Image (tube, rainbow, N blue to C red):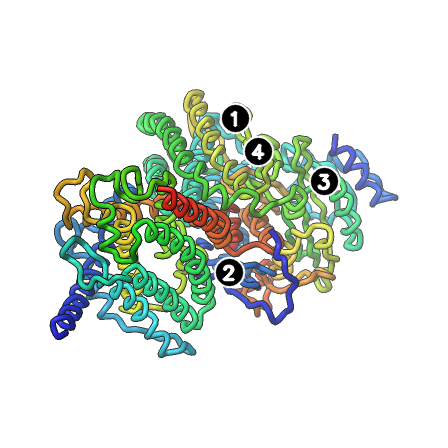
C-alpha cells in the first residue's frame, strides 16, 4: 500500500527510465546468477526487491544531487531513518552511500536510497536538515569512508579519535 | 521544563559528565553547558570503546565473526547474534529447523528479561535507590544460570550457528525455565510495589523529558523510547521474523512520552517476554537443531541483504553486502542505542541535570553497543 | 570553677569518644542493615559479624595520603572536614541522656544545638568551594540551600515544643513530658499541650532532620549518580573519614533531639523505670529508621526538595505553631 505510493513518488526522480519488468526479474534471481560474471556498477533507477530474500522492498539509486529530493519524499511519507552507511566499490572506483528507511506502522515498507560517488571526489549533500538524526550517521560515514557531506554542521570524527585522518573501511586501508 | 532566564555566554560553565561518571554506566562523555542546575547545551562524545566491528566483519569469515556480535551488547547479547545469523541464513539460503528457531526465540526472550532486569536496577540506582538493583540482579542470576547451562557462557554468548544452534536444551533447562516464570512474575509484582508506586520515583519521572513522536521519527528511535512516545513499533510484530508470528503477545505502548512511560514499557515487556517463553516451552517441537543440508563454506550469493530484529534495546539491523566470497564485502551493524542516544543532545536542553541523567537512564544505554 | 572546667574537658573527651564510636559503628550498622535489606551478607569477614570492620577501615583511611588537588584552597580544604566534625562533637556536650548523664546542662541548650547545626553547613560550603571541582561546587551549593530551607521549618517546630515546655532547657523539656507516652509531645493527650496536630509536627521535624543531615532521600549534597560524590569528591584519607563520621554524628544528634523534643527523652512509655536505656532504645530505633529509609527510597531533585520545604513544611509548621499558641492560651 504505502510501498506503492512511495514507489510512485520515487519514480518521479527518474523521468526517462521507468523500471522495466526485466530489472525486477534479474534481481530476484540473484541466486541463480553466474557468480563469475563481472558485476557492472548499477545504473541509477528504482528497483523493487523481493522482500523475502533481501529484507527490503524498494531500492532506489539516485544521483548525488537528488538525495535531498528523495529523502524529502520519504520524510513526507513519515519514514524514519534507520542508518546511513557506505560501501567501497574499489573495482569500479566508486563509493556508495546507503540510506536505510523504514516506517513505524504496520504497513511495512523498507526503502533503501543509494548513490554512487566518484571515489576521488566523494561528496554528497547532507540530509541533517531533514532528518536531524542523520547527524551522527553522516559523521560516522565520513570518518569511515572519507565521504564529504556538504553542509553538515559538525563533520568531525565521531567514533575514531578526533585527530584521525584515515578511513578504515576503505578497501585499500592498511592498519 | 525550560530554563526561565535568558543567558549571557559568560554566565554558563561547562560540566564534563564522563567518560568516567557513575551515571553514564560506561565510557560515555557528555559535555554539558550549564546554567546552575540547568543544561543549556549538551554534546555527546562517543567512541571511547570503539572496536571497529564492521571492519572485523569484512576481514573474518562468516563463522569466525559469530562471536563478535555478542561483544556488542553485553546485556542482551543473544538478540544481536540472532540478527546476524538470520541475515546470513537468508542470504545463503540455509533452512533452519523449527526446534532451533523456537529455542532461539526462548533464549532471546530470556536474555531480554535479563537485560531489562539489569536496566531496571541501574535505572533506579540512577535515581538514588540502591536496593532494587540487588533484587533485580538476584532474579537475573537465575536467567544467567539457565543460559550458562545451555550456552556455556554467562554474558557474551556464542550460541547461535548458521542454520541452528550449538547445543540443544535439556529437560533440566525446560524445568528451570518453567519454574522461573512464576517466580519472575512474583518479583515483578514486588518491584511495582517497591518502586513504581513510590511517590518520589513518580515525581521524578512524570512529565520529565518529553519526547515527541516527531523527534523519535527524525532520530530513528526504537524500543521503549519510541513505544513510550505512543509509537506502536516492535520489529517482532511489525516485521515478523523467526517464529514470532506463532506467539501471542502484546506490544506495550504508552502515550506519556515521558521517562515514566519508557519505564512502564520496559516493565511490561518483561511480562510479555515471559508469555513468549511460556508459549515457546509449550510449543517446543522435537527434531534436530542443525539442518541436515548445510553448505560447508558459507558463501552467500552476490547481493545485499537486510535483516532487522528487536533486541532488548530496540531495532537492530544488519546490512550484509556480499560479493560471493568467503567474507562479507560489507557488514553494517545498525545499533538501536546509537539512534536513541543521539536524541539526548537535542532533548536535554533546558532540563535539570538530575532530570537529564534520569532521562539518560531511561534510554537504556549500553555503551559498547553505541560505539561498536 | 576548676571543677566545672574539668567537667567540661572530660565531657568533651567523652563526647568525642561517643561520637567517634557511634560514627564508626553506625557505618557498620548501616552496611549490615543495607545488606539485610538487599538480601546479601554485608561485611562479615573481619571479626564476629564483621565487628572489626570499622576500626580496620579507620586504620586504612588514616594510613592513606591526603591528596590536595592542584589549585585548591589548601587552608580551607584542610579546615573543612575539621569544621564538619567540630560542631557535631560540641553539640553532644549539652544533650541530656538521662537525669544524671549530661555533660553541661544549659538553660539555652536548644539554642546552642541549633547554632552548632547551622555551623555544620559552612563546612560543606568550604569543602565544595575549596576543592576546585565543579561537581563539588554544585553539591555544596545544593547542600547549603537545602540546609537553609530546612532549618526554618525545623526551628518553627522546635519553637512549638519550646512554647509548650516554656523553657529552652533540654532537661526541662524532658521533665515536662514525664509520665506515660500520652504525655510525650508526639501524642499530647495528657500533657500540657492538647494540640492533636503534634504528630504532624513530629513528622515535620523528622523530615527536616533527614534533610539537615543530608540523608537519603534528601542526599542531594552527595548525589553520587549525578554529582559523583558531591562535596567530598576530592577528599580521600581521613578528610573523607571526618566527613563520613560527621554525617553519622549529625544523625545521632538529630535523633537525640527528636527523642528529647518529641519522645519524652529517657522516660518510659508506661511511666515505669525511666532511665538512660530508654533514651538509647529510642535513639537507635530512630537511627534504624534513618537507615531503613535510605535503602528504600530514591532521591528527590533539588526543586522537589525546596518545594517540599517552602510550599508544604513551612506553612504547615507555622500553622501548627499558631494553633499551639492558641491552645496554650485557651487551656
Relative depth, front residue between B235 and C154: C154
The answer for which chain carries disc 4 is B
Asked if the residue under mark 3 is in contact with the one under mark 2, i.e. CB atoms within 8 Å, the reply is: no
* Residue B116 figure quarter: top left
Q: Which residue is mark 4?
A: B253
* Quadrant of the rendering where the N terminus of chain C is positioned: bottom left
Q: Secondary structure at mark 3?
A: loop
Q: Are marks 4 and 1 in contact (CB under 8 Å)?
A: no
Q: Tell me which numbered mark, 2 or 4, is placed earlier along the sequence.
A: 2
Relative image position of residue B198 (x, y in whole percent):
43, 39
Residue at image mark 2:
B29
Q: Secondary structure at mark 2?
A: strand
Q: Indicate left or right for B281 with C24 as reference.
A: right
Q: Position of residue B358 (x, y in %)?
A: 50, 49
Dot in front, 2 or 4: 4
Q: Which residue is mark 3?
A: A78
- As measured in the structure, the alpha-carbon distance from the residue carrying label 2 to the one carrying label 3 is 32 Å
Total numbered labels: 4
Q: Are marks 3 and 4 on the same chain?
A: no
Residue that badge 1 annotates: B249
Residue B138 lies, with reference to residue A93, above or below; the image says above
Alpha-carbon span between mark 1 and mark 2: 37 Å
Characterize the local packing of mark 4: few (<14), some (14-19) or many (20 or more) Cα atoms within 10 angstroms.
many
Above or below residue B369? Residue C136 is below
Q: Give the chain letter at badge 3.
A: A
Circles 2 and 4 in contact, beta carbons < 8 Å: no
Amino acid at each position: 500500500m504505502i510501498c506503492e505510493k512511495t514507489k510512485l513518488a520515487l519514480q518521479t526522480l527518474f523521468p526517462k527510465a521507468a523500471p522495466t519488468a526485466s530489472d525486477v526479474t534479474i534481481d530476484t534471481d540473484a541466486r541463480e546468477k553466474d557468480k563469475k560474471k563481472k558485476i557492472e556498477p548499477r545504473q541509477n533507477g528504482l528497483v523493487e526487491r523481493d522482500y523475502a530474500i533481501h529484507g527490503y522492498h524498494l531500492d532506489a539509486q539516485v544521483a548525488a544531487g537528488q538525495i535531498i529530493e528523495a529523502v524529502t519524499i520519504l520524510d513526507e511519507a513519515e519514514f524514519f531513518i534507520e542508518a546511513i552507511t557506505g560501501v567501497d566499490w574499489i573495482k569500479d572506483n566508486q563509493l556508495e552511500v546507503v540510506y536505510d528507511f523504514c516506517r513505524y506502522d504496520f504497513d511495512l515498507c523498507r526503502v533503501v536510497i543509494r548513490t554512487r560517488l566518484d571515489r576521488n571526489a566523494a561528496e554528497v549533500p547532507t540530509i541533517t536538515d531533514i532528518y536531524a538524526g542523520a547527524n551522527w550517521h553522516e559523521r560516522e560515514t565520513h570518518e569511515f569512508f572519507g565521504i564529504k557531506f556538504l553542509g553538515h554542521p559538525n563533520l568531525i570524527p565521531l567514533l575514531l579519535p578526533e585527530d584521525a585522518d584515515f578511513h578504515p573501511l576503505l578497501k585499500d586501508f592498511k592498519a | 521544563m525550560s530554563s526561565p532566564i535568558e543567558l549571557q555566554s559568560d554566565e554558563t560553565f561547562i560540566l564534563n559528565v564522563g567518560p568516567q561518571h557513575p551515571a553514564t554506566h560506561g565510557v560515555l562523555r557528555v559535555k554539558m553547558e550549564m546554567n546552575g542546575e540547568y543544561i543549556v547545551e549538551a554534546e555527546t562524545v562517543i567512541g571511547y570503546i570503539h572496536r571497529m566491528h564492521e571492519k572485523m566483519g569484512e576481514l573474518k569469515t562468516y563463522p569466525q565473526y559469530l562471536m563478535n556480535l555478542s561483544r556488542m551488547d553485553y546485556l542482551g547479547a543473544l538478540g544481536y547474534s540472532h540478527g546476524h545469523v538470520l541475515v546470513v541464513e537468508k542470504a545463503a539460503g540455509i533452512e533452519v529447523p523449527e526446534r532451533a528457531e523456537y529455542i532461539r526465540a526462548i533464549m532471546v526472550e530470556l536474555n531480554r528479561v535479563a537485560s531489562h532486569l539489569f536496566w531496571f536496577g541501574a535505572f533506579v540506582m540512577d535515581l538514588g535507590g540502591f536496593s532494587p538493583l540487588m533484587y533485580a540482579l538476584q532474579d537475573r542470576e537465575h536467567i544467567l544460570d539457565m543460559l550458562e547451562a545451555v550456552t556455556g557462557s554467562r554474558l557474551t554468548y556464542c550460541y547461535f550457528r548458521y542454520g541452528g544452534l550449538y547445543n540443544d536444551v535439556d529437560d533440566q533447562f525446560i524445568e528451570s525455565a518453567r519454574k522461573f516464570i512464576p517466580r519472575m512474575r512474583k518479583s515483578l509484582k514486588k518491584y511495582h510495589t517497591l518502586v513504581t508506586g513510590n511517590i518520589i520515583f513518580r515525581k521524578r519521572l512524570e512529565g520529565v523529558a518529553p519526547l515527541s513522536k516527531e523527534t523519535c521519527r527524525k532520530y530513528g528511535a526504537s524500543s521503549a523510547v519510541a513505544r513510550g512516545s505512543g509509537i506502536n513499533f516492535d520489529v517482532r510484530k511489525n516485521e515478523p521474523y523467526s517464529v514470532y508470528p506463532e506467539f501471542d503477545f502484546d506490544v506495550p505502548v504508552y502515550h506519556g512520552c515521558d521517562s515514566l512511560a519508557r519505564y512502564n514499557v520496559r516493565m511490561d515487556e518483561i511480562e510479555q517476554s515471559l508469555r513468549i517463553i511460556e508459549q515457546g516451552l509449550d510449543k517446543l517441537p522435537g527434531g534436530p537443531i542443525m539442518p541436515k543440508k548445510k553448505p560447508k563454506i558459507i558463501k552467500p550469493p552476490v547481493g545485499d541483504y537486510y535483516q532487522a530484529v528487536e533486541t532488548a534495546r530496540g531495532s537492530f539491523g544488519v546490512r550484509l553486502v556480499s560479493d560471493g566470497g568467503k567474507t562479507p564485502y560489507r557488514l553494517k551493524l545498525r545499533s538501536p542505542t546509537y539512534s536513541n542516544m543521539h536524541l539526548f543532545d537535542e532533548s536535554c536542553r533546558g532540563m535539570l541535570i538530575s532530570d537529564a541523567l534520569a532521562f539518560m537512564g531511561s534510554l537504556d544505554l549500553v555503551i559498547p553497543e553505541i560505539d561498536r | 570553677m576548676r571543677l566545672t572546667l574539668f567537667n567540661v574537658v572530660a565531657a568533651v573527651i567523652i563526647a568525642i569518644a561517643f561520637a567517634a564510636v557511634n560514627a564508626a559503628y553506625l557505618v557498620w550498622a548501616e552496611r549490615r542493615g543495607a545488606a539485610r535489606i538487599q538480601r546479601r551478607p554485608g561485611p562479615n569477614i573481619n571479626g564476629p559479624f564483621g565487628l572489626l570492620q570499622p576500626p580496620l577501615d579507620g586504620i586504612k583511611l588514616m594510613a592513606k595520603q591526603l591528596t590536595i588537588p592542584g589549585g585548591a584552597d589548601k587552608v580551607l580544604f584542610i579546615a573543612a572536614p575539621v569544621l564538619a566534625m567540630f560542631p557535631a562533637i560540641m553539640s553532644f556536650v549539652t544533650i541530656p541522656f538521662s537525669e544524671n548523664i549530661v555533660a553541661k546542662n544549659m538553660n539555652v541548650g536548644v539554642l546552642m544545638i541549633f547554632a552548632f547545626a547551622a555551623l555544620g553547613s559552612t563546612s560543606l560550603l568550604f569543602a565544595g568551594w575549596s576543592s576546585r571541582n565543579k561537581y563539588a561546587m554544585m553539591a555544596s551549593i545544593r547542600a547549603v540551600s537545602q540546609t537553609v530551607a530546612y532549618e526554618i521549618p525545623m526551628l518553627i517546630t522546635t519553637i512549638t515544643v519550646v512554647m509548650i515546655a516554656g523553657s529552652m532547657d533540654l532537661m526541662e523539656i524532658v521533665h515536662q513530658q514525664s509520665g506515660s507516652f500520652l504525655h510525650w509531645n508526639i501524642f499530647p493527650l495528657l500533657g500540657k499541650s492538647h494540640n492533636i496536630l503534634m504528630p504532624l509536627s513530629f513528622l515535620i521535624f523528622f523530615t527536616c532532620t533527614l534533610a539537615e543531615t543530608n540523608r537519603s532521600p534528601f542526599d542531594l549534597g552527595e548525589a553520587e549518580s549525578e554529582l559523583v560524590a558531591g562535596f567530598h569528591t576530592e577528599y580521600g584519607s581521613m578528610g573523607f573519614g571526618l566527613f563520613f563520621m560527621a554525617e553519622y554524628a549529625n544523625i545521632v544528634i538529630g535523633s537525640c533531639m527528636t527523642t528529647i523534643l518529641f519522645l519524652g527523652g529517657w522516660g518510659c512509655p508506661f511511666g515505669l523505670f525511666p532511665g538512660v536505656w530508654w533514651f538509647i532504645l529510642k535513639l537507635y530505633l530512630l537511627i534504624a529508621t534513618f537507615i531503613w529509609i535510605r535503602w528504600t527510597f530514591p532521591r528527590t531533585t533539588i526543586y522537589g526538595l525546596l518545594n517540599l520545604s517552602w510550599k508544604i513544611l513551612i506553612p504547615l509548621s507555622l500553622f501548627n505553631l499558631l494553633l499551639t499558641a492558641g491552645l496554650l492560651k485557651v487551656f
